[in-house]
Image (spheres, helix red, strand yellow):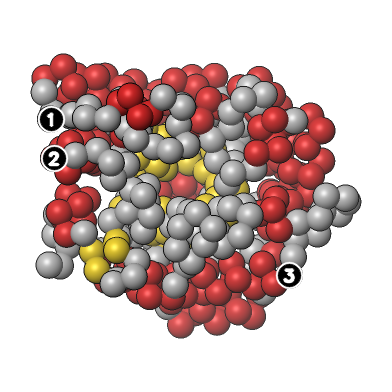
Amino acid sequence: MKTLFALVAACCGLLATAPVSACSFEQPAQARAESCNRLLARSINFGNMLDHAREGMAGPALRDEFIALTAQAGFTAIRLPIRWDAQAAHKPPYTIDPEFFSRIDGVVKLSLAQGLAIVLDMHHYTAMMSEPDAERARFLGLWKQVAEHYRDAPATVIFEVLNEPNAKLTQAKWNDALAAVLPVIRASNPHRTLIVGGSEWNNRKMLETLALPKDDRNLIATFHYYEPMAVTHQGAEWVSGAAAWAGTTWRGRPSELRELREAFDAVAEWARREQRPVYLGEFGAYSKADAASRIAWTRAVREHAEARGFAWAYWELAAGFGVLEPRALTWRQPLLSTLLPAAPR
């Protein structure tokens, strides 16, 4: 992959020709994490595309046009959820399907060509959540392959170690797994910026007990925010009891804004104390919420994130939360303008 990524990065000015402030391997580790996080400032999740057992089984297949439209709209980066474990063998060395690697390579190449940073996120790894001890060796084996495969990619290709640790992958077990996997990744990517969040579905409160190595300053901390769930997940078919939330509204009332402000202030205080950049890796309201609530909630979350210097990634592009109509390739303009107030109309 060295030739591919070297050529793409060179033609797009993403390697040594990039300014030192723009996410470069030439920067010191802390500065690199901070500048790479700035490139993630306005990200969009390409969710429900490559993060299930088969592409397109839970949403649209990923089209090349999605990438070009994302760049043209003014987003700065793509967070690409990938279900690596569904494309890999179950016995050592846990070989990932070469054709799947090629598919991801194509998305990375097109994203770089459009000037977008890209986060390669290990997503929906359900076996790691339900059997973390039994699955540990496979988790490490998958990351060894992914890391080695992209070792020559430019600094604007960022790895997210695991999406939403939950269930039996408790914070203690996740801290233990993290301590094991980081050296595996660092063996081939000593200067790559990595994204790490806490357990309980990347809950903001778990940042307090997330064990990040003090001597690795090239890390971005992440959390996800869907509070209150009765607003953001009302009518969600995959959430037990969500039908009962139908009709719940959110208008940015003082009490609603206070909850949001206090939540984000706590994250900002943790980040200040730990000197870690922060990526709000997911936020969004499902399409079954009323339009006014979706717009008000999304605007408030974005504004509160930006006010504290958090990069953000809206969930998601073109499925149930989507800002793009995937067949007509047209933006849902009220939602797009809420995320990107200066977006072209």
Badge 3 vs badge 1, beta-carbon distance below 8 Å:
no
Q: Which mark is residue 1?
A: none
> Which residue is more in the foreground, 137 or 217?
137
Give the secondary structure at mark 3: helix
Q: In x, y percent, where is residue 190?
A: 65, 52
Mark 1 / mark 2, whichever is N-terminal: 1
According to the image, label 1 marks what residue? 251
Identify the disc placed on residue 98.
3
Q: Secondary structure at mark 1?
A: loop
- The disc labelled 1 sits on which kind of residue? Arg
Identify the mark nearer the N-term, 2 or 3: 3
Q: Residues within 10 Å of mark 3 (few under 14, many from 20)?
A: few
For the question of whether residue 122 can be seen, the reply is yes
Kind of element beneath mark 2: helix
Determine whether, in the image, residue 111 is placed left or right of residue 148. Answer: left
Give the amino acid at mark 3.
Answer: Pro
For label 2, the residue is 292
Residue 91 appears at what percent x and percent y?
A: 88, 50
